[in-house]
Image (cartoon, rainbow, N blue to C red):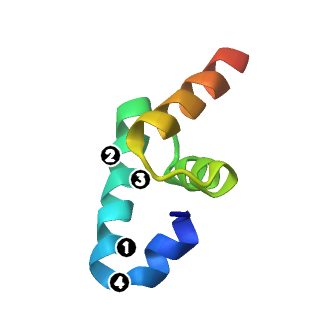
Amino acid sequence: MTYQDATAASPKAETNIEDEIAYLAKRHRISPAIVREIIRRSGATERSSIEREIAKGKARR
């Protein structure tokens, strides 16, 4: 399930994804826009895969 599929599915699913985005952004001290971009590029919505992508990005800095 991609980010677009999840947001088009239902308003409840959209709020869950937005909550996840806000949580991950706050936890990793990055912008919610960066989290959305990672979700868009990877196509994954599960938290663990997104966190791995965030960690890869932080390792490059």
Instruction: Quickly name the residue at label 3.
Output: 21
CA distance separating discs 4 and 1: 6 Å
Q: Which labelled disc corresponds to residue 23?
A: 2
- Disc 2 element: helix
Vertical placement of residue 25 versus 28, above or below:
below
Instruction: Quickly name the residue at label 4.
Output: 10
| Mark 1 nearby-residue class (10 Å; few <14, some 14–19, many ≥20) | some
Mark with earlier residue (4, 3): 4
Closer mark to the observer between disc 4 and disc 2: 4
Vertical placement of residue 8 versus 55, above or below:
below
Give the x, y percent position of residue 37. 64, 53
CA distance separating discs 3 and 2: 5 Å
Instruction: Quickly name the residue at label 1.
Output: 14
| Mark 3 nearby-residue class (10 Å; few <14, some 14–19, many ≥20) | many
Give the residue at the far right of this rendering: 60
What residue sits 46% from the left and 76% below the top? Answer: 7
Is 4 situated left or right of 45 in this image? right
Kindly check if marks 1 and 3 are in contact, taking CB atoms under 8 A apart as contact.
no
The type of residue carrying mark 1 is Glu
Give the x, y percent position of residue 53. 59, 33
Vertical placement of residue 21 versus 56, above or below:
below
Give the x, y percent position of residue 12. 27, 77
| Mark 2 nearby-residue class (10 Å; few <14, some 14–19, many ≥20) | some
What residue sits 41% from the left and 82% below the top? Answer: 9
Image quarter where the C terminus lies is top right
Kindly check if marks 3 and 2 are in contact, taking CB atoms under 8 A apart as contact.
yes
